Amino acid sequence: MDHYVDIRLQPDAEFAPAMLMAALFTKLHKALAAGAHQDIGVSFPQMEEGDAAPAPTPTRTSRIGAHPRYVLGQVLRLHGTSLALHKLLTTDWLTGMRDHVACGVVLAVPTDVRHRVVSRVQAKSSPERLRRRQMRRHGLTTEQAQERIPDSAAEMLNLPFLTLRSQSTGQTFRLFIRLGVEQATAVPGEFGAYGLSPQTTVPWF
């Protein structure tokens, strides 16, 4: 985790930043999964900027209209060794996004930085997931499951998120992201195919 590279969204009149960040993150996820890059983590350095307060303790609400704050910002930062980052950047994973982003160069992490965990938080009561479970366990039809578990039953987290599409099911879902507390000491380890980890830290600056 001694190097990083910033990928910044470019202003776009047709696409909102949230849509572009989701598209960029999807491409990164595919590249990390295909290359088994467990040595690359991600962060969103603008995540706490703007009018929103720092990432809160997750709270839940059953009101479908109560949406989490989108405060991820417009910069995706990749963390890793110089070798790992250069290896990723020499692939064609940014194809289709190059008109929408500005990719920086690989730089050394500044000295005396803090560290944070950037992790995924999963909502437990996705209506679609609960409906599939009901259909398997109780032999319900799609219509019966829809009636029993309407979309209004969605559990929402008061966290920033990316709206992504599942490669296996084709269903859209929200990938909620939480920042851990700042700490002086780095915690080494591996990252998943989203570049996130429940315990491994990335430099925060």
Image: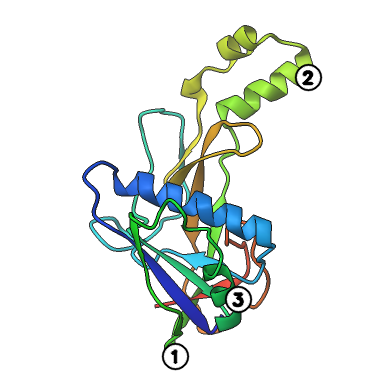
Cα distance in 3D space between marks 1 and 3:
22 Å
Spot occupied by residue 105 in the image (x, y as percentages of width and height): 41, 78
Spot occupied by residue 104 in the image (x, y as percentages of width and height): 38, 73
- Residue lying at 40% horizontally and 70% vertically, measured from the top left: 6
Whether 43 is drawn above or below 17: the answer is: below
Proximity of marks 1 and 3: CB atoms separated by less than 8 Å:
no
Binning the other alpha carbons within 10 Å of mark 3 as few (below 14), some (14 to 19) or many (20 upward) gives: some
- Residue lying at 57% horizontally and 73% vertically, measured from the top left: 201
To which quarter of the image does residue 46 belong? bottom left
The numbered disc on residue 84 is: 3
Which colouring convention does the figure follow? rainbow
Whether 5 is drawn above or below 109: the answer is: above
Residue 93 seen = yes
- Residue lying at 47% horizontally and 55% vertically, measured from the top left: 95
Q: Which residue is mark 1?
A: 112
Binning the other alpha carbons within 10 Å of mark 2 as few (below 14), some (14 to 19) or many (20 upward) gives: few
- Residue lying at 60% horizontally and 12% vertically, measured from the top left: 148
Disc 1 element: loop
Proximity of marks 1 and 2: CB atoms separated by less than 8 Å:
no
Q: Amino acid at mark 1?
A: Asp
The numbered disc on residue 137 is: 2
Residue 69 seen = no
Cα distance in 3D space between marks 1 and 2:
53 Å
**Which of the two labelled residues, at mark 1 and mark 3, occupies the earlier sequence position?**
3
Q: Amino acid at mark 2?
A: Arg
The numbered disc on residue 157 is: none
Disc 2 element: helix
Residue 9 lies left or right of residue 200; in this view the side is left
To which quarter of the image does residue 98 belong? bottom left
**Which of the two labelled residues, at mark 3 and mark 2, occupies the earlier sequence position?**
3
